[in-house]
Amino acid sequence: MTPDLKGIVIIVGNYGSGKTEVAINLAVASHAEGVAGVRIADLDLVNPYFRTREARHQLHRLGIDVVLPPEKYLHADLPILSPDVAGMIKQPGPLNILDVGGDHVGANVLAAVADAFGDKPPQMLQVVNPYRPFTETVAGCMKIRREIEAAAKLDMTGIVGNANLIDETDVNVIYEGHRFVQRFSRESGLPVAFVTADVGLMTDLDPDRLACPVLPIRRQLVPPWGRSANLAAG
């Protein structure tokens, strides 16, 4: 069962949480499930390395609309917000994904476009990898939640469990991560929207042990010596 999300979905989290991978793969999975008019906007204005724009060519080939800064600024380490983002928010399609920069610093951009949301409250999902610093405890996750909400001037509406150890991930890492986000959910009152798993682990996962949808991840944001996965693979 893959996530079924509609409207404006904001993906936030701390640095290293994997939120951009989540945003990209959510767009691809939703498109594959038949959601027409999937759009994704790169609002990461603080991290020059792992951003949605790095996967733009594959996304475009799949027919997914990618909202980016002007071409001449694509690789600039500059805080440039495309005016198309406000237009996307004011006139959203069936699914509009906003990939926001890490921590509260990255979430500041949301306050700048807050008026554009109007009476269309967005979903804001906090990506959590309990194997990363600062989110290995529920208290740490709660702190990051409060900081992002204050910066964005928006309320968090759900949690995404993105437990992984990159190449060392196995199904037990996924199961333990799921148990962790369930604890975070109970203490925060936020629902678990979905969890993620590398596409290579999907057939090994027991769905009865995961009480939520699972988003398959095909890694895009790899080091220079790595190779991105093919997003169009079945």
Image (tube, rainbow, N blue to C red):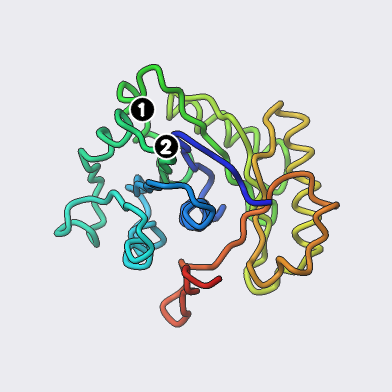
Q: Mark 1–mark 2 contact, CB under 8 Å?
A: yes
Q: Which residue is mark 2?
A: 107
In the image, residue 37 lies at what x, y percent? 37, 46
Q: Label 1 vs label 2: CA separation?
A: 8 Å
In the image, residue 101 lies at what x, y percent? 41, 46
In the figure, residue 71 lies in which quadrant? bottom left
In the image, residue 175 lies at what x, y percent? 80, 56
In the image, residue 111 lies at what x, y percent? 36, 27
Is 153 or 124 nearer to us in this picture?
124
Q: Residue at x 32, y 62 (%)?
A: 60
Q: Is 138 situated above or below 2?
A: above
Q: Is 182 situated above or below 229?
A: above
Q: Residue at x 75, y 52 (%)?
A: 177
- What amino acid is at disc 1? Ala
**From where the camera sits, is residue 22 visible?**
no
Is 137 or 37 nearer to us in this picture?
37
Q: Which residue is mark 1?
A: 111
- What amino acid is at disc 2? Ala
Q: Tell whether 16 sits left or right of 185.
A: left
Farthest residue toward the left?
Answer: 72
Q: Residue at x 58, y 33 (%)?
A: 145
Question: How many numbered marks have been drawn onto this rendered protein structure?
Answer: 2
